[in-house]
Image (cartoon, rainbow, N blue to C red):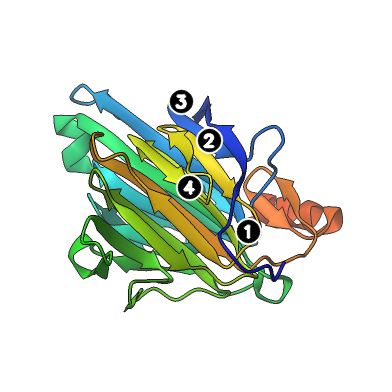
């Protein structure tokens, strides 16, 4: 840590596909064999793209979380969130929900009623962000930002449009609040785009390419759709795209590592096994609440 210069690519992970919730397919570059987490990022799922017939869309019915945050970023489709604090939220294309499970929450993540009936293209992301020990029992809740209200940045060369969900890019700062320094950004790169940005040398940095191909680092290492590049030490990140290629898109994940023990069991992420046992007991005893529906 603390190295200066351009960060090299030190690992490329090809996302494996698996089923989640009621059986929808996700691409998951982390956690995967050889990459347990990218501290403080615990998980990245690309959900879809999948096209549903009318009435066929599925999601994740009532389930708990404790000890971390879940971030939903919808590209296409519509999600209906309901939770044990009594809140209901429709999350549409371009919208972000940044949820703090903290001490414990039960929620459902199902297709929105309109999307369920019409069907169509579902595509998006779910990211799990760890909480530091001191905040693992924070009050559960969420921040919701409509697509139009998420700050947008443009690269110096004018060829990269950036949705700044968290952190900062080209002088634009996100509106969402995080417990520890986190960057989460959607970069849409035109052919022949190039950028070099400062990334705090203490940060862990990774990028998941979900369209086209992007080259990273001093060696211009190519990373293609469905792959995540994990960067090594340095203080800058270099990216570019082929002038003859098509539009490329990536999700940039960067943040200060917590450097704390990670104990995970399904929907719970704590520091110790004892805390996981307590989480299961508290959930089973109903101490994380239930979703009350009319
Ligand atoms: Mn969930």
Taking the spot 72% from the left edge, 66% from the top edge, the residue there is 1
- Residue located beneath label 4 in the image: 216
Distance in Å between CA atoms under marks 1 and 2: 21 Å
Taking the spot 58% from the left edge, 74% from the top edge, the residue there is 180
Label placed on residue 28 = 2
- Residue located beneath label 1 in the image: 66
Taking the spot 72% from the left edge, 48% from the top edge, the residue there is 264
Label placed on residue 190 = none
Mark 3: few/some/many CA within 10 Å (<14, 14-19, 20+): few
Q: Is residue 261 visible?
A: yes
* Residue lying furthest top: 53
Give the structural element (helix, strand or loop) at label 2.
strand
Q: Is mark 2 within 8 Å of ligand 1?
A: no
Q: Earlier in the sequence, mark 3 or mark 4?
A: 3
Where is residue 12 drawn, in percent x and y?
Answer: 58, 37
**Mark 1–mark 2 CB contact (< 8 Å):** no
Where is residue 64 drawn, in percent x and y?
Answer: 57, 51
**Mark 4–mark 1 CB contact (< 8 Å):** no
Distance in Å between CA atoms under marks 3 and 4: 34 Å
């Amino acid at each position: 840590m603390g190295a200066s210069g351009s960060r090299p690519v030190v690992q490329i992970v090809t996302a494996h596909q698996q089923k989640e919730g009621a059986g929808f397919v996700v691409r998951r570059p982390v956690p995967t064999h050889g990459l347990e987490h990218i501290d403080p990022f615990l998980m990245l799922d690309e959900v879809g793209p999948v096209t549903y017939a009318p009435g066929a869309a599925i999601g994740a019915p009532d389930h708990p979380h404790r000890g971390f945050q879940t971030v939903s970023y919808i590209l296409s489709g519509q999600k209906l969130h309901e939770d044990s604090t009594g809140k209901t939220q429709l999350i549409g294309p371009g919208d972000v929900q940044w949820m703090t499970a903290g001490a414990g929450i039960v929620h459902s993540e199902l297709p929105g009623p309109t999307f369920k009936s019409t069907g169509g293209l579902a595509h998006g992301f779910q990211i799990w962000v760890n909480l530091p020990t001191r905040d693992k029992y924070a009050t559960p809740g969420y921040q919701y930002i409509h697509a139009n209200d998420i700050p947008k940045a443009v690269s110096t060369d004018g060829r990269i449009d950036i949705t700044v969900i968290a952190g900062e890019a080209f002088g634009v700062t996100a509106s969402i609040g995080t417990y520890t320094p986190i960057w989460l950004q959607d970069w849409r790169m035109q052919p022949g785009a190039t950028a070099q940005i400062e990334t705090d040398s203490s940060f862990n940095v990774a990028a998941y390419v979900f369209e086209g191909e992007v080259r990273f680092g001093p060696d211009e290492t190519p990373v293609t759709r469905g792959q995540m590049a994990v960067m090594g030490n340095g203080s800058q990140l270099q990216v570019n795209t082929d002038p003859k290629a098509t539009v490329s898109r990536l999700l940039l994940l960067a943040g200060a590592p917590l450097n704390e023990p990670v104990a995970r069991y399904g929907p719970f992420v704590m520091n110790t096994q004892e805390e996981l046992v307590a989480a299961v007991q508290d959930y089973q005893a109903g101490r994380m609440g239930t979703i009350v529906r009319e």
